[in-house]
Image (cartoon, grey):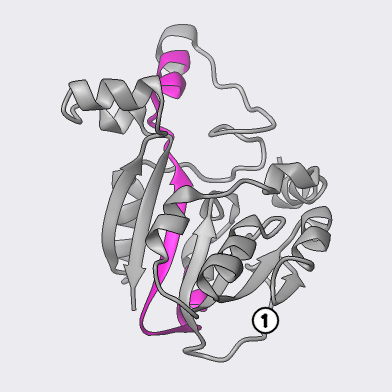
């Protein structure tokens, strides 16, 4: 499947696909009055929260037109564009925080896009990233025991995903390209059975139970 076909499938998704709040970002962005760029902002749900609760100024980039039309009403400024190809209309060192929630897996060259974004972050600022964890137990189970690798309209094997990562592989990719990862952690939904198993096993199986990896890049 070509990159252009995948992109067209992505931009044609319904707006509710892009309406999820990311609690891990809400917990990680604690300052007041920050300049925030949300890459892949969806309908702007996270940005609306940051504006209301923390007085942040939130800009967004969104490729899906339906989601973009919602985001225009929620954020201070949104551009309808592909982050990989657009000339970013922002100043260098403009943003305190950049959010990239489930974005890198959709990109042809995630490293190139990240380096472009990095220029727009203030010294001391951060890029916060989540990527799906391809090592999740359901994926491993289906592949090993069912000979199954089936793309879906939602989730880790979303049909618009071009790349797949584990915690180790995404860290290695970024560090190999001189993008320093300050912190990388696994995201396990709470409350859930996975969360309970993780606690009683003292984190032994976290790599299989986590749905995502969360990364912090410091400038």
Magenta stretch in the rendered image: 114-142
Quarter-wise, where is residue 84 in the image? bottom right
Image position, residue 110 (x, y; %): 51, 61
Q: Is residue 133 left or right of residue 50?
A: left
Q: Is residue 110 positioned above or below 5 on the image?
A: below
Residue highlighted by disc 1: 87
Q: Considering the numbered disc 1 on the image, is that residue within a helix, a strand or a loop?
A: loop
Number of disc labels: 1
Q: Viewer-proximal residue, 167 or 192?
A: 192
Q: Viewer-proximal residue, 205 or 36?
A: 36
Q: Viewer-proximal residue, 184 or 191?
A: 191
Q: Is residue 92 a member of the stretch shown in magenta?
A: no
Q: Residue at x 29, y 33 (%)?
A: 207
Image position, residue 59 (x, y; %): 64, 75
Q: Residue at x 42, y 62 (%)?
A: 128
Q: Is residue 215 left or right of residue 182?
A: right
Q: Is residue 146 left or right of residue 205?
A: right
Image position, residue 51 (x, y; %): 59, 70
Q: Is residue 208 left or right of residue 58?
A: left
Image position, residue 188 (x, y; %): 37, 35
Q: Is residue 187 positioned above or below 80 on the image?
A: above
- Extreme front residue here? 53
Where does the C terminus fall, quadrant-wise? bottom left
Q: Is residue 120 a member of the stretch shown in magenta?
A: yes
Q: Residue at x 74, y 68 (%)?
A: 81
Where does the N terminus fall, quadrant-wise? top right
């Amino acid at each position: 499947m070509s990159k252009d076909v995948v992109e067209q499938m992505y931009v044609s998704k319904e707006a509710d696909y892009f309406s999820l709040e990311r609690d891990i970002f809400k917990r990680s962005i604690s300052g007041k009055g920050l300049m925030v760029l949300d890459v892949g902002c969806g309908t702007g749900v996270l940005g609306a929260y940051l504006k209301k609760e923390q007085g942040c100024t939130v800009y967004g980039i969104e490729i899906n037109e339906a989601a973009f039309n919602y985001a225009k009403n929620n954020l201070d400024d949104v551009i309808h564009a592909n982050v990989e190809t657009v000339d970013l209309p922002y100043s260098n060192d403009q943003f305190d925080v950049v959010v990239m929630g489930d974005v890198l897996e959709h990109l042809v060259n995630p490293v190139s896009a990240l380096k472009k974004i990095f220029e727009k972050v203030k010294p001391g600022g951060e890029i916060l990233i989540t990527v799906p964890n391809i090592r999740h137990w359901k994926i491993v189970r289906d592949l090993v025991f069912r000979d199954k690798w089936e793309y879906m309209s939602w989730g880790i094997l979303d049909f618009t995903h071009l790349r797949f990562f584990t915690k180790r592989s995404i860290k290695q990719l970024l560090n190999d390209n001189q993008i320093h990862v300050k912190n990388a952690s696994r995201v396990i939904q709470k409350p859930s059975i996975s969360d309970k198993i993780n606690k009683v096993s003292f984190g032994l199986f976290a790599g299989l139970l986590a749905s995502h990896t969360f990364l912090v890049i410091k400038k």
